[in-house]
């Protein structure tokens, strides 16, 4: 790569970091307007809207399963053609539904429809193809899980073919995963969150503190700026991209620090998407244990969901893997969303205090308790609300009625729409992963962050499979 190309990449990353900071300051200044300007809130409105519509149809004696269509299991290509032909109108209706809700909300947030619409058409068509490959009856024998297919296909297109930058408008990784997580809340009982939540928070805290300290001190030994070390540490310990941006702002990091940390997060997150499910399959680990392990070892919500979903799919189709497919996703959600993500604001506030008290005063912003709310991932509220709503609805039915009526008519269609959002997300991760750009961050940040990766993976495995194994193996009981 020429020096000019490297400079261009660095300028692009710097511009991205500046845009993130400017957007964050804009959101802080708009007050109640953030309810319709911020992506987290739109994810809440969209997801809860889908849940209420689904419930309204259910109360009327119907279901939204007609529009929650997805490719059926097949063994030969003639079945694929017949299935697509039979349900063509349903796929068109579903596409129009997604297009309307995403385009309208993103337009309010400043994304141009003329860029998003053609890009999303491409995403949706490819998502159908990904679903079809994953529905092949022998797909699981070859580890062709939809999340892994989506990620691999996206990376091949991005790095071998290349797409114009304006198409990134449709590759809304964070938006798709937030909608998916909130819809997931509608399939995850509140009683389970209450029961396993303290364990998830405790395990997450142990791993987060250990990982942060290791990355910080290794980075300092390598001669890195302590503000960069803190930003890298947050990326590995708390919540990937969001954590890196939050801590960079809290400690007054240089404008290039957040992009460097984000690069490390993306690089290792992609590696773990493939590494964790495949190693877990070799060891025949319980799905709940793997979900928790992924939750403590992955560095981004979207990547973690891809790994957890992939292992859940394996458990549903490969003999010898204990636990239910849902346990993998539930375990991950409890560890990552409940255990780690909710601490972003608290970590940012604490690091701002450390920065202004023990480091140079000019290197950090003045600590403000409101930081906890500003940094708090609002979509997590939607996740809890969705869980509460569905728990209240299901409490009026017996277990038999739930399994034979509520699950296929209400919960099942919501789960299917959630899966579509996850596929949109996984494919978008691949499409926005450009290896040439990832290679420019330097070796010292890489080795500092990698030291934390080792801690995450090893300590996460010990805590998930040994210390707290009882909890993760009994999520469905």
Image: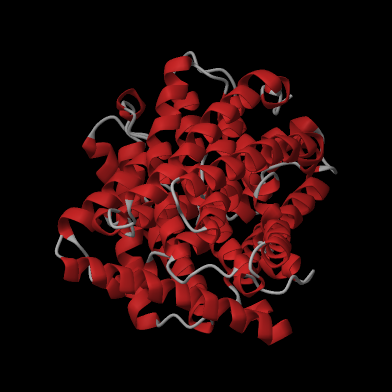
Q: How many numbered circles does the render carry?
A: 0
Q: Relative to residue 475, is residue 368 depicted above or below? A: below
Q: Position of residue 239 (x, y in %)?
A: 58, 52
Q: Is residue 70 left or right of residue 234?
A: left
Q: Position of residue 319 (x, y in %)?
A: 46, 15
Q: Position of residue 345 (x, y in %)?
A: 70, 61
Q: Is residue 389 left or right of residue 158?
A: right
Q: Nearer the viewer, residue 242 or 380?
A: 242
Q: Nearer the viewer, residue 452 or 314?
A: 452
Q: Nearer the viewer, residue 71 or 468?
A: 468
Q: Residue at x 70, y 68 (%)?
A: 356
Q: Is residue 309 left or right of residue 130?
A: right
Q: Position of residue 379 (x, y in %)?
A: 65, 61
Quadrant of the image for the N terminus? Answer: bottom left
Task: Check the image and tell me how it is coloured.
Answer: secondary structure
Q: Relative to residue 142, is residue 97 depicted above or below? A: below
Q: Quadrant of residue 328?
A: top right
Q: Quadrant of residue 71?
A: top left
**Is residue 341 visible to us here?**
yes
Q: Relative to residue 92, is residue 295 depicted above or below? A: above
Q: Residue at x 74, y 24 (%)?
A: 477
Direction top: furthest residue? 320
Q: Residue at x 51, y 64 (%)?
A: 175
Direction right: furthest residue? 396
Q: Nearer the viewer, residue 116 or 13?
A: 13
Q: Residue at x 25, y 70 (%)?
A: 7
**Is residue 58 visible to us here?**
no
Q: Quadrant of residue 468?
A: top right
């Amino acid at each position: 790569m020429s020096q000019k190309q490297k400079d261009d990449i660095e300028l692009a990353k710097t511009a991205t970091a500046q845009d993130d900071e400017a957007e964050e300051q804009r959101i802080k200044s708009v007050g109640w307007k953030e309810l319709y300007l911020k992506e987290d809130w739109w994810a809440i409105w969209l997801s809860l809207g889908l849940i209420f519509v689904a419930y309204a149809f259910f109360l009327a004696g119907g279901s939204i399963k007609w529009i929650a269509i997805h490719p059926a299991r097949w063994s030969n290509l003639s079945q694929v053609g017949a299935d697509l032909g039979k349900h063509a109108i349903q796929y068109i209706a579903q596409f129009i539904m997604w297009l309307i809700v995403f385009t309208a909300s993103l337009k309010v947030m400043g994304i141009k429809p003329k860029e998003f619409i053609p890009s999303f058409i491409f995403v949706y068509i490819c998502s159908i193809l990904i679903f079809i490959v994953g529905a092949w009856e022998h797909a699981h024998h070859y580890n062709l899980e939809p999340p892994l297919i989506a990620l691999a296909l996206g990376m091949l297109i991005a790095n071998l073919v290349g797409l114009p930058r304006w198409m990134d408008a449709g590759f809304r990784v964070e938006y798709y995963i937030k909608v998916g997580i909130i819809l997931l809340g509608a399939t995850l009982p509140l009683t389970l969150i209450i029961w396993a939540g303290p364990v998830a928070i405790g395990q997450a805290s142990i791993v987060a503190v250990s990982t942060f300290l290791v990355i910080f001190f290794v980075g300092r030994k390598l001669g890195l700026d302590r503000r960069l070390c803190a930003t890298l540490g947050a990326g590995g310990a708390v919540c990937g991209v969001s954590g890196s941006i939050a801590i960079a702002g809290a400690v007054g990091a240089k404008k290039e620090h957040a992009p460097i940390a984000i690069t490390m997060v993306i690089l290792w997150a992609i590696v773990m998407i493939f590494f964790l499910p495949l190693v877990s399959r070799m060891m025949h680990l319980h799905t709940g244990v793997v979900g928790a392990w992924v939750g403590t070892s992955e560095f981004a919500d979207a990547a973690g969901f891809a790994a957890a979903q992939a292992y859940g799919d394996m458990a549903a189709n490969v003999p010898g893997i204990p636990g239910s497919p849902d346990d993998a996703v539930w375990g991950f959600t409890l560890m990552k969303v409940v255990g780690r993500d909710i601490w972003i604001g608290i970590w940012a506030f604490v690091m701002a205090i450390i920065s202004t008290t023990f480091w140079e005063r000019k290197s950090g912003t003045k600590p403000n308790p409101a930081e906890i709310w500003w940094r708090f991932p609002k979509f997590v509220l939607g996740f809890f609300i969705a869980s509460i709503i569905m728990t209240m609805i299901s409490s009026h039915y017996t277990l038999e009625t739930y399994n034979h009526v509520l699950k296929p008519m209400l919960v099942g269609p919501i789960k299917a729409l959630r899966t579509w959002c996850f596929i949109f997300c996984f494919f978008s991760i691949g499409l926005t992963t450009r290896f040439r750009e990832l290679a420019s961050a330097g070796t010292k940040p890489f080795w500092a962050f990698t030291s934390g990766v080792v801690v995450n993976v090893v300590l996460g495995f010990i805590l998930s499979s040994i210390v707290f194994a009882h909890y993760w193996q009994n999520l469905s009981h």
